[in-house]
Amino acid sequence: MYWGHMVLDIIISGLISGSVYALLAIGFSLIFGVARIVNIAHTAFYMVAGYCIYYTTHEMGFHPVWGMFAAVIVVTGLGMICYRFLINPIREHEGAVLIATIALAMALQEIMTIMFTGTYLSVPSLVKGYLVILGVKVFYQQLLTFIAALVALGVLWALLMKTRLGLAIRSTAQDKEVANLMGINEARVAMITMGISVGLASFTGAIVVPLTILDPLMWMHPLIMMMAVVVLGGLGSLKGSFIGAYILGFAEAIVVFAIPAGAFLKGSAALSIMILVLIIRPEGLFGVTFEEER
Amino acid sequence: MELIVFYLRKLVTIIMNEVIVLPSRVVVVVFFLFLLFLPVFTSNQYTLRIFTLTCIFAILAASWDLLSGFTGQMNFGHALFFGVGAYSAAMINLHAHIPPWGSIPLGALVAVLAGLIIGIPCLRLRGTYLALTTLAFPIILMGLVFAFPDLTGGELGISGIERITNSRVANYYIAAGLMFGLCTIMWKITDSNTGIIFHAIREDELAVRASGINTTRYKLMAFCLSGFFAGIAGGLYAHFMRIAGPSTLEVSMSFLVVIWAVFGGVATIYGPVGAVFILFPLLEFLRFWQEYRTLMFACVLIVILLYMPDGLFPWLRDKIETECPRCKIRNISSRTTCRVCTARLD
């Protein structure tokens, strides 16, 4: 009985954190592929979305659904403004962009601390209640989060593969100069991709925040896991990010539930898996080896 | 007597002809004198403590520059070297009772070992892959620190370490002296043939390999050298703060090092050192605004980067000095002709 509980716990927790990492990692690798920006502030936007929901539900008293809509719209706008005024002017300088995004993440963290204090906050779940499978409580909110993540991934896949915008994004990621020659406005594609990427981050924040606790430092752990997922799956490979996210999500869940004192080791274990894979396959699971950029 | 006069005259000649002519050299001399006479002008314990820490972090930032600025191996996990240096110096001091002058170099050697261990898997990676992979190492180590609290002290860290000396002023002079010494060594390394190879690896690794140079060996060497200097900084920090805690391994520590180095200008050594001397006291100076301190720090960073994306110090240096187009010697920008070959400057 005990083992059954544990396995089910591992499956639920692994599926949810895997989906969250997949959404975050795909957004992160989209903007990296198109504009070569390593956006450290990506998960900071995820955190801001969580606080947006807290504000609309607790301070203004709206239903959580409106909070989710508000969060996605506000944070996407914020992300595009930040891109336009902070990152775009220095895009040619890789190091400077890196520092600018780190500074942006720090600034967002501090603004949230000043506005909402550093205490732990929580957000009401969208649907109440739970169902019992083999004696384990599965909250409807957990199911909802998982399904919403899958739907978002599906919509994103359709957007990238079936529309003209998706074609433009993919071709810009493949070769910026040639895409420009074919009449694609590279600057506008980068701007739109930034919007999609931050929108995904805020959506992730919006669906996962009822399951976790809000605090201004909550962006650190997902940031590291997201980067590990991206590297593990291969930069610029959506399939790789998807599979890598579930591998690391399940690795974390197994370590947490199966090993005593595992909560401390969950990051270490997942990252060790990433490093082992990289030693065997330096370009990640599904990465393609590019000609050396010179 | 005559000998003394001879050397004095030689010194004056050097100062007149080599130092006064270039504003950047004057700045270095003024900076040196400032550090030398700081304890004379202020006996404030707090100020001395800030500047001791600043010197320690300056070593750390310069060591990041040696690895990542020069060879282009973006290291996002520099806190690993710092933390390994701090923890091993603390453990050696506490368990083997070796005094600080022995435990700090030994800790640095352990950090070199860490450099080798992470350098070998990282040799096959490049660019963003490398940056994101190196980020993982300090976090793995931090997980281990928390998982074995008996050995490492867990969240509280290892405390009760010996002081370097008992007086604040002596501690300050040790840190400042080491900072000057080690940064000079690093600058000399980057100025030597090895440094030229490091530069070349960043610009075009394939071409370096084609010239018959074993780039693997040089990249590993960069990892080890950088690990050594960062390990010394870590050991100094542990002995100065008398605690080696998990904060030395945090992600924010790794990020802070990158912020300092890029803010000051990479591949210069003097850039990161100068940046630490501006940013670290700035953060302390803003403490009367406790709540808004980190926010102000981030805003200052963003604003300065928007105007000087190549870093603060290369930008300043280009403003006050120009390079002679014929003999490549630097001149103060107010001159119209080169001070050596009298070619026209434009």
Image (spheres, coloured by chain):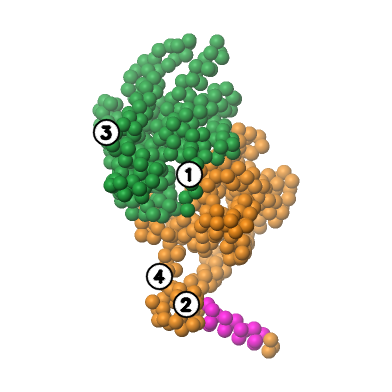
Chain colours: A green, B orange
Front disc: 3 or 2: 2
Amino acid, disc 3? Ala
Residue assigned mark 1: A290
Quick check: B66 above or below B337? Answer: above
Q: Residues within 10 Å of mark 1 (few under 14, many from 20)?
A: few
Q: Is residue B343 left or right of residue B109?
A: left
- The x and y percentages for residue B278 are 46, 60
The N terminus of chain B sits in image quarter: bottom right
Secondary structure, mark 1, is loop
Nearest to the observer: residue A49 or residue A188 = A188
Q: Chain of mark 4?
A: B
Q: Which residue is mark 3?
A: A70
Which residue is label 2 attached to?
Answer: B326
Residues A147 and A184: in front is A184
Between B286 and A259, the one nearer to me in the picture: A259
What secondary structure is marked by label 4? Answer: helix
Tell me if residue A215 comes above or below residue B302 in the rendering.
Answer: above
Specify the amino acid type for callout 4. Answer: Lys
In the rendered image, the vertical position of residue B42 relative to residue A141, given as above or below: below
| Mark whose residue sits in front, 3 or 4 | 4
Residue B270 visible to an observer of this rendering: yes
| Residue A36 image offset from top left, x and y in percent | 41, 46
